[in-house]
Amino acid sequence: MNSSEIIQRLKGGRAGRRDLMRVLAGAGLALASVPIMARRAAAAAPELTVMEWAGYDVPEIHPGYINKYGAGPTFSIFATEEEALQKMLGGFVADLMHPCSYNIKRWKDAGILQPIDVSRVPRYADIWERFRAIPETSFDGKPYLVPFDAGLSSVIYRTDLVDAADVADPSWGLLFNEKYKGRLSMYDTDTTFIEIAARISGMYADYLHLSDEQLGTIKEMLAKQKELMKFYWSDQAQLEQAVASGEIVAAYAWNGSVTNLKKQGVPVEYMVPKEGILGWCCGMVRHAEAPGDEQAAYDLIDAMLDPEVGKYFVLEQGYYHANSKTYDLIGPEKLAEVGLSDPAATFGALNIEPEPEEPYRSKYIALVNEVKAGT
């Protein structure tokens, strides 16, 4: 795959938002060879560095900022939040970063975040209350996260290749069904494996504090599941290609993949499992030692919350925008296509879980790594 092809995938919303770096590495490309990940122009734009997911560094995400300053900020692209955290703990300092809600407390406790003065973000008041009220994103009454994007994680499946009886009672258990051995896929993550297994096995009430005995049962479940997997995916585009070809008939997926595949005419559905659909919300945070232009940082955050940006984001990238006014710009038919016939109801019911704290988090990750390694 050449750099031009990757750029077109990214522009079309088909490149994995979290893992494009892995695509680049697999293609033997250096970051500098991909012009869409642009460095700041040599104009008189303020000094501002943003740690960002691949695909969010495009001009369509912050046109108001470019209009004001003549150029976008400098982007430092990361593939995973853990990678971003370790880079900052190693001394890298940005002005803004883009983690998800479950990581805010951990990043704050690591000493790399400062509160955000939301009075300097005019569009903050337009953010859905559900997103502004996510636990462990505010401390001592001070917000540390300005929500920008949200989405779902669930089971996508081919309606023509999965027996109707196997989805009549929708369940995450489809990804553990031996009938589809070699045609299933899971996202290459860590604690989410534990959460899904806990939901299926009825241990979800204890998810954040699973005992060693419970973890032993879950490890057996995940080891059996591993034998059914075609692969663990880390590139969203790779997954979508496999589902489109029929190589994969069911998989863990973000809702953006549903949008992309339906646009291609692939017969897929997105499950609402009886054990609960997973939700996520991510947004902008400020580094505790942010060295750049403070006003520019607030201007970028507010520009990203523009409803017109949200319209582009929802329709082209397939995810959800935090600004409630975005959805006034999108007709009912288009909202239905992306699974948002009733945005208020969808967001109100969104299940956004915190990350397990230590020592559980490390135990969970170690267990998943052992399963993946076959030990």
Image: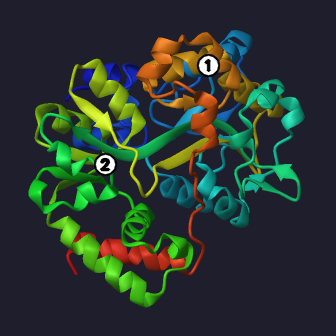
Q: Residue 315 carries which label?
A: none
Q: Name the one closer to the observer, 195 or 272.
A: 272
- Say whether residue 156 is left or right of residue 305: left
Which secondary structure lies at badge 2?
Answer: loop
The residue at the point 84 percent across, 37 percent down is 118
- Say whether residue 85 is left or right of residue 319: right
Q: Point out the image quarter for the C terminus.
A: bottom left
- Say whether residue 250 is left or right of residue 75: left
Tell me where residue 149 sits by quadrant: top right
Placement of 8 over or under 105, stated as above or below? above
Question: Which residue is under mark 1?
Answer: 327
Question: Which residue is under mark 2?
Answer: 234
Residue 150 in view? yes
Q: What residue type is labelled 1?
A: Tyr
The residue at the point 63 percent across, 27 percent down is 73
Which secondary structure lies at badge 1?
Answer: helix
Q: Nearer the viewer, mark 2 or mark 1?
A: 1
- Say whether residue 190 is left or right of residue 231: right
Spatial separation of the CA atoms under disc 2 and disc 1: 30 Å
